[in-house]
Structure formats: structure tokens, C-alpha cells
Image (cartoon, helix red, strand yellow):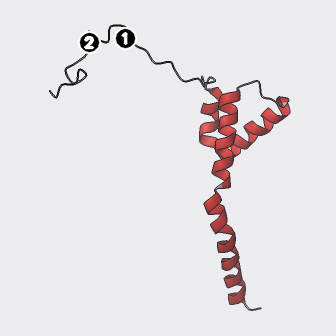
């Protein structure tokens, strides 16, 4: 084979492999998954310390800029806050709440 055929074959192979990887974005998906695992499970991870070590290592590889900040963040509350209701809502209504136009 001559050099031009090798270059063309390498370019075609790179495009054939790069397009699906660009569409699937495995590094971003893996980074998002590990960030969620670290953020929402905290120090007590199901599977023990080996799993936690692997998750932290993968997160450090996929997102080195944010891995330290995420690991230091406290575990967030997953429940939605209950709405606060005003017991005196009738007295505080505006004219538009009463059905008026102005």
C-alpha cells in the first residue's frame, strides 16, 4: 500500500469511530453518572468502599475541574419543599385575583 491509501483509510476509520462516539458522548454520560453517585449517595455507598473508590476515581478522570467541589459538597435533600400557604389569602387578594380587569 502506498502512503496515501493508509492516510485515507485512517481518516475513514477515525470518522467511522468518531461520529458515534460524538453522538453518544460516553465521557459526559459517565461523568454525569458518577457526579450523581457522589452527590446523592454521600459517604455511605451501597457496594462498600471498593465501589466508592471506583466511582470517585472515574469522576476524577471524567471531570477533574469539578470533582473536588462535588466531593466536598454536602448531600442534597431530594424531597420537594412543601408549598407555604397564607391563611389570610382572602384579605390580601388584589383586584386581578378577585376577577377584575385592572
Q: Position of residue 13 (x, y in %)?
A: 70, 76
Mark count: 2
Q: Position of residue 59 (x, y in %)?
A: 69, 41
Left or right: residue 36 versus residue 87 is right
- In the rendered view, would you say 23 is above or below 3? above
Look at mark 2 in the image and give the residue it sits on: 92
Q: Position of residue 45 (x, y in %)?
A: 77, 28
Q: Which residue sits at x=29%, y=11%? A: 90
- Residue 40 occupies which quadrant of the picture? top right
Which residue sits furthest bottom?
Answer: 2
Quadrant holding the N terminus: bottom right
* Other-residue count near label 2 (Cα within 10 Å), few / some / many at <14 / 14–19 / ≥20: few
Secondary structure of the residue carrying numbered label 1:
loop
- Mark 1 and mark 2 in contact? Answer it, CB < 8 Å: yes
The mark that comes first in sequence, 1 or 2, is 1
* Other-residue count near label 1 (Cα within 10 Å), few / some / many at <14 / 14–19 / ≥20: few
Tell me, for residue 44, which label it has, or none: none
Which residue sits furthest left?
Answer: 102
Q: Which residue sits at x=61%, y=61%? A: 23
Look at mark 1 in the image and give the residue it sits on: 86
Foreground of the two, 13 or 88: 88
Foreground of the two, 28 or 82: 82
Secondary structure of the residue carrying numbered label 2:
loop
Left or right: residue 80 versus residue 54 is left
Amino acid at each position: 500500500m502506498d502512503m496515501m491509501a493508509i492516510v485515507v483509510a485512517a481518516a475513514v476509520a477515525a470518522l467511522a469511530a468518531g461520529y458515534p462516539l460524538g453522538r453518544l458522548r460516553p465521557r459526559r454520560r459517565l461523568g454525569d453518572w458518577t457526579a450523581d453517585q457522589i452527590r446523592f449517595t454521600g459517604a455511605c455507598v451501597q457496594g462498600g468502599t471498593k465501589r466508592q473508590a471506583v466511582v470517585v476515581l472515574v469522576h476524577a478522570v471524567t471531570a477533574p475541574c469539578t470533582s473536588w467541589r462535588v466531593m466536598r459538597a454536602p448531600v442534597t435533600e431530594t424531597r420537594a419543599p412543601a408549598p407555604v400557604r397564607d391563611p389570610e389569602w382572602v384579605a390580601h387578594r388584589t383586584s386581578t385575583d378577585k376577577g377584575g380587569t385592572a
